[in-house]
Amino acid sequence: MKNYFSIQDIDSLDHWVDEAIKIKKAPLSDKVLGVNKTIGLLFFNPSLRTRLSTQKAALNLGMNVIVMNFTKEGWSLEYEDGTVMDQGNSEHVKEAAQVVSQYCDVIAIRAFAKLENKDEDYSEKVLKGFIKYATIPVVNMESATGHPLQALADAITITEYKKKDKPKVVLSWAPHPKALPQAVANSFVEMMQQMDAHFVITHPVGFELASQITKQVPIDYNQESAFKDADFIYVKNWSSYTDYGKVLSADDSWKITEDKMKLTNQAKFMHCLPVRRNVVVDDVVLDGQNSIIVEQANNRTYAAQLVLKKILKNEK
Ligand code: CP
C-alpha cells in the first residue's frame, strides 16, 4: 500500500479488522519489520490519541519516530502552484514534501479543516499537496474531510463488541460550543457503509453531511426514535456542511443522557474523544458500564499499526 488517505484505501475491511485484532493480541510480533525505517509525524493541529497511538504503533514495529508540531515550529506553507510568494507563506509544499521524503520512510500528517472555505477544505490541499510531491507513503492522521485511522479503530471496536451479525449503529450529532470539522463523522459514515450494520444518522435539520458521503444512509431528524433498539450509539459534533462551518445550533436537547440511552438495546456508547463532559454527553453515560470510549481509543494503536505494517510490507 502506498498511501492511507481514506478508507477507500482499505481493500477488504473484514481482513483488515481480523488482522488488527491479531496484532492487538501480539503487538510485538513484527518488531523487526520497521528497523532502520523512520516515520515523520507532522502536526498542523493538536492531538493526544493520534499522536501517541501512531507513535506507539511505529515503535511496536521497530521504527524510529520524528514528531514535528508544524504550525508552531515549521515554515508557513504555500500550496498553490505558480504563486508569487511575496505574502505570508515562506516555503512551498513542493520542497517541504520532497525534503521530508529524504529524512523519512513514511510521513503521517494531521491537518484539520479551517472551516472558512468549503471548496478549499474539501479539495484536501494539505494532504493532497504532500501526496503529490512526497516520494514516500503518506498517512492521514485526520485531514480536512476525513479521519480514516479513527474510523478503522471504530470498525475494530464495533467488531469486538457486537453481539449480532448486523447490529444497529446510530451516529448522533450532539451539541458543542465550537465549530468542529466533519472529518470524523464523514469517515465513520463511509466505514459503516462498508460494515454489515443497520446504520442510521440522526442530527438536527441543517447539519446534513455531504450527500456524496452519506449517499443512501437513512437520516432520522428525531434523535429519540433513532436511538430505539440501537446496539451502538456513536456521538460526534460537527458544524454545518451546507451553511459551511457554522454552529447553527447548540441545542442542549440533543445532549446524550441516561434516559436516551435507556431507549436503546443497552447500546455501547462510543466517542472518538476528546469529549466535553456534560455538554456533549452526561457524566453518567461516559462513566457507565456501556461506555467503551477508552477501549475505542486503545484500538487506535492497532489501527495505526496495521496501516504501517501494510505500508512497510508494501501490501494491500
Ligand atoms: N480521536 C482523536 O483523533 O483524538 P486526538 O485528536 O487526541 O488525536
Image: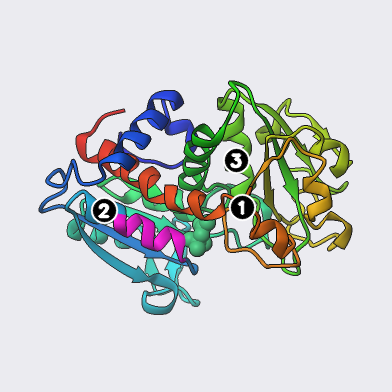
Query: Helix, strand, or loop for circle 2?
Result: helix
Query: The disc labelled 1 sits on which kind of residue?
Result: His
Residue at 78% across / 43% down in the picture? 208
Spot the residue most to the front: 289
Residue at 74% across / 46% down in the picture? 172
**Magenta stretch, residue numbers:** 48-56
Residue at 48% across / 57% down in the picture? 80
Query: The disc labelled 3 sits on which kind of residue?
Result: Phe
Of circles 3 and 1, which is in front?
Answer: 1
Q: Earlier in the sequence, mark 2 or mark 3?
A: 2
Q: Distance between the residues labelled 1 and 2?
A: 24 Å
The answer to the question of whether label 1 and label 2 lie on touching residues, with beta carbons closer than 8 A, is no
Q: Which of marks 3 and 1 is nearer the N terminus?
A: 3
Q: Is the stretch drawn in magenta largely helix, strand or loop? A: helix
Q: Distance between the residues labelled 2 and 3?
A: 24 Å
Q: Distance between the residues labelled 3 and 1?
A: 11 Å
Query: The disc labelled 2 sits on which kind of residue?
Result: Ala
The residue carrying mark 3 is 188
**Dot 3 surroundings within 10 Å: few (below 14), some, or many (20 or more)?**
many
Residue 76 is situated, as x and y percent measured from the top left of the image, at 43, 73
Residue 216 is situated, as x and y percent measured from the top left of the image, at 73, 25
Query: Helix, strand, or loop for circle 1?
Result: loop
Work out whether residue 60 or residue 139 is closer to the camera in this orientation and state it.
Answer: 60
Work out whether residue 123 or residue 60 is closer to the camera in this orientation and state it.
Answer: 60
The residue carrying mark 1 is 271
Question: Magenta stretch: residue 55 in it?
Answer: yes
The circle on residue 58 is 2
